[in-house]
Amino acid sequence: MFVAPDPGLVRLRVSLRAVLGIGLAVALAELAGFSLTASITAGLAALLALFTVGDPTVRRQAVTTALLPAAGFPVLALATVLHDLPLLRDAAWLLVVFAGVHARRWGPRGHALGIFAFMQFFVTQFLHALPAQLPELYAAVALALLASGAVRFGAWCIERRVPPPAAPAPLPGTGLARPTTRQAFQATAACAVALAAGQLISHERWYWAVGTAWWIFVNTASRGETLVRGFRRVLGTVTGIAAGLLIAVPLGGAPAPTALLVAVCVFGIFYTAPLSYSWMMFFVTVMAGLLYGLLGVLHPGLLLLRFQETAVGAIGAAIGVALLPVTTHAATNAWIERAVTCVHTCTTAAARRLAGDPDADPAPHAAELELLLGRVRLSLAPLVHPLSPLRARKARARRVLALLDDCAREIRGLAAVAADPDASHDARLAAAAWRVEAAVHALVPPAEPVRPEVTEAAGVPRHHPGAEAALGHLHGLEQALVDLAAPLRTSPRAPLVPAA
């Protein structure tokens, strides 16, 4: 994790910016004379704004950040008003859960607004906020969003030079066939189980179980992904509790060292999140212990309770995925199909560009392929997990990933050649591009196969160095796609991933 590539030090800069934005939000809340509860609320609101807003452009990110109060303020008011009405409070939170997950069908904006709404309900339970505190909490959240927005979009707008990659569109479907709709029912059922079981363990800290069940369903699309994420969350929580016993408990809520360590945890959350969910949860758990220390309620028994509630939430998630499941087999096949189709699209665009079409550009398709491969890796994570007992399927899944990585490498090279203004068309490109298309269609049968139109440019040498490089990448693609057919063509008795 600590030696993973970080091109342009983007991860490092985003993490440092998060520390700065959240620190500024808390500092302004303290200078405004807010209570400790409001200051912590401000810090968590800034963290969520910086962590969850992931639109593909800076303008859209700013709009989503501005819309966060529209989703969070009504939920904040509802949670505080229903604080002493357990049955209504629980029912309201489950409705928020359903709406928050269902909103993911609208892409990154719906995803961010849904998380922010859920977490506003969670924060009121975490801090035991009451209706009388609502104006101060509103002011703290608004101040936090302004502070974090000023840092993100004004002082340090990293995304202007390094645009974030657009998330792949969700898998299609309507009604209950839409994965996000199914997951909304799954998450609601999981949170309901976690809520009931969590309250049996503790009438005061039951919300940790609900939070665990909710976050396990974030950024997952199948049953296998959800179960693996649950395991990683428990692992991160256990290690975080151990660290909390060694760090947070001895501090006893001392303000200065606690603030410094919270900043370290914030950095760790942002720096490790793209790479390891377990490490991210480690830092989240340590930070939670430090915040409890500030509130004066931290003791070893509380950390043990945190583990129990996390385990209950993970069990709730495991039960929830049994409702209207999206199987790992179906999700994986869908993402692989989209990745292979993207290979074809990029190849065709590159061939057209080399043939002299200035409007054809393979670069966006190459970037899309990288994102789709990320989704394939996430979907196959349950099968390639070290604890998976399905050794034959694990080997085949790793083979699929290796061959798709080969495709991505050749696509990157092909896009680089096509971007060279001196690269020229070679008569052999048409045949090579057609063979790649045939290999793609062997994996993903087309509705209407169309042969790439690549014509020789007049007055251009038949054999050009740029074309030679392009041919090498096309031949590499063809071979990778041909090899990919073997692990993907499986009988019903031996699917790549277990279908249930």
Image (cartoon, rainbow, N blue to C red):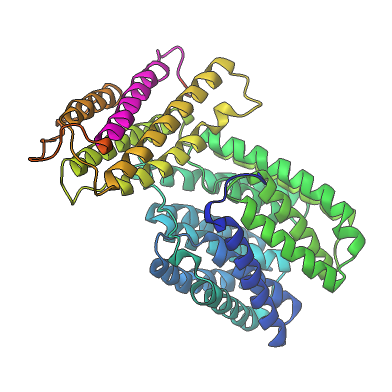
Residue 401 appears left or right of 199: left
Residue 466 appears left or right of 307: left
Q: Quadrant of the N terminus?
A: top right
What residue is drawn where x is 16% and y is 34%?
Answer: 452
Name the residue nearer the viewer: 475 or 133: 475
Residue 281, horizontal then vertical, whole percent: 69, 50
Residue 218 appears left or right of 137: left
**Quarter occupied by residue 381:** top right
Residue placed farthest to the left in the image? 458
Give above or below for 350 relative to 249.
Answer: above
Give above or below for 431 relative to 271.
Answer: above
Residue 354, horizontal then vertical, whole percent: 20, 41
Where are the magenta residues, as a range? 467-495
Q: Main secondary structure of the magenta part?
A: helix
**Quarter occupied by residue 257:** bottom right
**Quarter occupied by residue 447:** top left
What residue is drawn where x is 56% and y is 61%?
Answer: 51
Name the residue nearer the viewer: 349 or 294: 349
